[in-house]
Image (spheres, grey):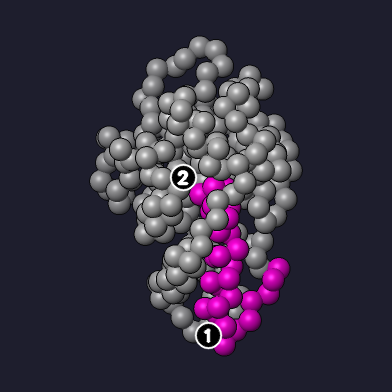
Amino acid sequence: MTSTVPAFGTPLRSLGPAAQPSAPRVEGATLQGVLLDMDGTLVDTEGFWWDAEVEVFARLGHTLDEAWRDVVVGGPMTRSAGFLIDSTGADITLDELTVLLNDGFEERISRSLPLMPGAANLLAELAAHDMPMALVSASHRRIIDRVLDSIGAHHFELTVAGDEVPRTKPHPDPYLLAAAGIGAEPARCAVIEDTATGVAAAEAAGCRVVAVPSVAPIPPAAGRTVVPSLEHVNLPFLQGLMTL
């Protein structure tokens, strides 16, 4: 059964955002868990967020610059929405805008929720081999739960939402919490992300990272592997990251 992270202040298995993993150290290169981003990684929804932002600001009388898309992608709602308010000068509060953007996004996923190429096969393979998985997203809980209805909550032992941690991506807290929640060491977890913001969070947590860029390019780096799609990722591939 999938666990969710409660609002900050309520412990999850007595673990906080910066808690240390509970699993004993395992000698050798052992993959202990796979932590996956959601938007743009498992589901093809990064464009949905931008479309919702464009639509909402159009109703407010503002046109968004296409160049801003790379700025807001992958980040927490507070950062992306705050940036757009500052950039446009729109007469709206952050709380009001957050509601409108979530409403616009939720309406879009109710019509269509396409999976990224290779996502279904990867989730099925990891589940078949009993590999612990956690979903780690900057999206709010209401959005994650709607998406899980389609991709299958049963795949994940734990889900972490952006509005349930005091510091979300690019800070390491969500990935540290997810690793601890599934009883794994961050260094023995493979993270799959599609944005520079998510990659930064995972690397700051000490995880091995597979980047599958969705909107903006992500260069290879030490401890990071870049692939064109999830069709290039399977369990042996992820296990091999532990030896790099």
Image side of residue 172 versus residue 21, left or right: right
Within the magenta stretch, is there residue 50? Answer: yes
* Residue 38 percent coordinates (x, y): 51, 49
* Residue drawn at point x = 67 percent, y = 43 percent: 229
* Residue 122 percent coordinates (x, y): 55, 36
Q: Nearer the viewer, residue 194 or 118?
A: 118
Magenta span: 38-67
Q: Amino acid at mark 2?
A: Val
Mark 2, other Cα within 10 Å: few <14 / some 14–19 / many ≥20: many
Which image quarter holds the C terminus? top right
* Residue 44 percent coordinates (x, y): 58, 55
**Vertical placement of 43 versus 88: above or below?**
above
**Quadrant assignment, res 231:** top right
Mark 1, other Cα within 10 Å: few <14 / some 14–19 / many ≥20: few
What residue is shown with label 1?
59
Count of picture labels: 2
* Residue drawn at point x = 55 percent, y = 55 percent: 114
**Quadrant assignment, res 3:** top left
* Residue drawn at point x = 52 percent, y = 23 percent: 31
Which image quarter holds the N terminus? top left
Q: Amino acid at mark 1?
A: Arg
Q: Is residue 180 visible?
A: yes
Within the magenta stretch, is there residue 78? Answer: no
What residue is shown with label 2?
136
- Sequence-wise first label, 1 or 2: 1
Quick one: SS at disc 2? strand
* Residue 152 percent coordinates (x, y): 41, 45
